[in-house]
Image: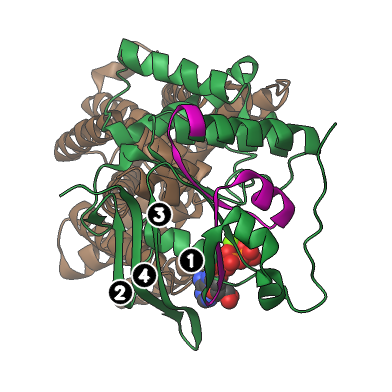
Amino acid sequence: MFVEMFQFDFIIRAFQAGLLLAVIAPIIGVFLVVRRYSLLADALSHVSLMGVAIGFLLKLNPVLTALFVSAAAALGIERLRQKQKMFGESVLAVFLSGSLAIAVVLIGMAKGFNVNLLNFLFGSLSTVRESDVWLIGSLSLVVVAFCTIFYRQLFLISLDEDLAKVSGVSVNMLNTILVILAACTVALAMQMVGVLLVGALMVMPVLAAMQVAKSFLQTFGFALFFSILSVITGLFLSYALNIASGGAIVLVSLCFFLLSLLFPKQG
Amino acid sequence: MHNNNCIEFANINFSYPHNQVLDDISFTVQEGDYVGLVGGNGSGKTTILRIMLGLIPFASGSAKLFGEDVEDFDAWHLIGYVPQHVARGEASFGTTVREVIESGLVSRKKYFLHKQPADEKLIQWAMNVAEIADLEHRMIGMLSGGERQLVFIARALVSRPKLLVLDEPTTGVDAQSQERFYRLLSALNQSHGMTIMLVSHDLEVVAREVKTVICVNRKLVCHVNSREFIEGDYLKRLYGEDMKYIHHEHNH
Ligand SMILES: Nc1ncnc2c1ncn2[C@@H]1O[C@H](COP(=O)(O)OP(=O)(O)OP(=O)(O)O)[C@@H](O)[C@H]1O
Ligand SMILES: [Mg+2]
C-alpha cells in the first residue's frame, strides 16, 4: 500500500511540500522558542486565515493573499515590539484575536463555510498544488541560506539583544527578516497542517529536541530529525487511516515530545 | 587624529518621559584607566553605559568611543560588555558555555559556523583567563549564578577588547570568587593594558581596586582618583550624612 500511494500525484506533492516544511518549520521554531516567542506562530496562523478569507472574498488565490497578509502583519508586530509600546505577548494576543474576528466576519460575508475553507482550518493533503510546492521550495532555500549565514548573529540575538547590538549586529533588521520568514512559513504550512496546528508544527519538535540536546547546535539537529520523522509518519497515517494530515503529523510529534520527557536532562 | 581618549562624554543629557536621568554629564576616560562608576540606585549608571555603547539615543551632547561618535563607531571587537543581570535570563536556553563564549567573536564579523584556528586560540585564552575551562561543555542553565557571570565575562574577553565595560558583575558572586574576579580585572588592566569601566555598589571594593572613581547622581558628582575618593566627603554628598567609608585592611 505504501508503494501504491505514490501513484497519486497529489500524494507526491504532499510529500514534497511536507518534507520542505519539515525542514524550515523547526529551524524558525528554534529561534522563536528560545526567545519565548512561540505564540508568534499561532498569531500569524490566525492572521493567515484572515488572508485566506480575503482571498475567497476577492476570488484571488487564497495562498497568495494569506502569504501577503501574514507577512504584512509580521512587520507590524515586529515594529510594535521594537518600539516597546506594548509587551510582546499582548501584541500577539491582539493580532491573534483581532484577525480571527475579521476572518469570521469575512467568512460570514462570503456566504458561510465551504469545503475549501475547512481544508485550511484542519489541513488537507489533496489541496497542495504544484505552484505551492514551488513556493515552499523557494522559501526553504531562503530560510536555510539566511539561518546558515547568520547563525552566529541569530544565536547572539536570542541570547541577549543588547549584547548583539554591542557586537555590531543589525538586530532590528535580522529580527524583521526572521519574523517575515516565519510569516511565510506559517502561511504556506497552513494548507497542509491547518490553521490551528501550524504553531505545533514549528514548536513541538523544538521542545522535544531541547529535552535531549546538549548544545544549541544539537537542538537544531534533533528538531530536524523529530520534525522530518513526524511529517513522514504523519502523512502515511493520514493516507492509510484517512485522517486529517495536520492532526496526524502533530500527534506523531507529540509522541516524540512525550518520549523526550523520559530523557534525563543533564548539563 | 588619535588621542588616548577611550571614552569621551560631553554635555550628555538624557530623559525618560517626566524623568530626567542624566543632566549635563561630561567626562573622559584615558586608555589604560580602571574606572569605578558609582552612585545610588537609579542614579543613572546603567544609562551612562548604555548611551556610551550606542544602545539608547541621547537628547543632546556627544559621546565618543576611541575618538569616534558612537553613532558611527563600528570597531565593536574593541569593546567587551557584560550587561547588568545578563547572567539571569537564560536558564532554559539550551546552550553550552562554549557556545556563549564563541558568540563573543561575532564582533569580529564572523558568519556561518566557520571558525579559524586563531579563533580557537582566543576561545581557549578567554576560558583560561576566567578560569572556567572545566565548564566548557556544561549547559549554561545548569551553572550557578556566579559561574554564569564568569562565563559572560569570558565572552566579553574573547574578542580581545581594549575596553571592558562591566555593569555590577559581582552581584550574586561569593566572596571567594569575587576575590578571584578582581584579581583577574587587575591583571587584565595591568598586563594587557585593558581599559576597564566597572559599575559596582561595593564602594569599599571599588576604592581598593580601581584607579579612578566617577560618581554620578543624575549629575556628575565627582571624577577623582581613588585616593581622593576615599579621603573626600563625596560619599556624604552621594548617600547622605550617615554613610561613611569604612576602610578595612585586607590581610587574609
Ligand atoms: N525603560 C525605562 N523607562 C523609564 N525610566 C527608566 C527606564 N530605565 C531606567 N529608567 C529610570 O532611569 C533612572 C536611571 O536608571 P539606571 O538604570 O541608569 O540606574 P542605575 O544607576 O543603573 O541603578 P541601579 O544601581 O539600580 O542599577 C531611574 O530613575 C530609572 O527609574
Ligand atoms: Mg544599573
Disc marking residue A260: none
Q: Mark 4 = which residue?
A: A103
Q: Mark 3 = which residue?
A: B29
> What's the residue at 33%, 47% (across, down)?
A182
**Mark 1: which secondary structure?**
helix
User: Does B210 appear in magenta?
Assistant: yes
Question: Nearer the N terminus, badge 2 or badge 3?
Answer: 3
- Label 4 and label 2: CA atoms lie apart by 50 Å
Q: Amino acid at mark 3?
A: Val
**Mark 4: which secondary structure?**
helix
Subunit of label 1? B
Q: Residue B202: tell me if it is visible.
A: no
Question: Residue B64 or B133: which is nearer the viewer?
Answer: B64
Residue extending furthest toward the bottom: B18
Query: In the figure, the green chain has which letter?
Result: B
> What's the residue at 46%, 32% (across, down)?
B157
Q: Residue B162: tell me if it is visible.
A: yes
Q: Colour of chain A?
A: brown
Q: Amino acid at mark 1?
A: Thr
Question: Nearer the N terminus, badge 2 or badge 1?
Answer: 1
- Label 1 and label 4: CA atoms lie apart by 44 Å
Q: Which is closer to the viewer, label 4 or label 2?
A: 2
Image spot of residue A60 (x, y percent): 14, 61
Tell me where the magenta segment starts and ends, as one range. Answer: B190-219
Q: Amino acid at mark 4?
A: Ala
Image spot of residue A137 (x, y percent): 20, 32
**Mark 3: which secondary structure?**
strand
**Mark 2: which secondary structure?**
strand
Q: Mark 2 = which residue?
A: B61
Q: Residues within 10 Å of mark 2 (few under 14, many from 20)?
A: some
- The answer as to whether callout 1 falls within 8 Å of ligand 1 is yes
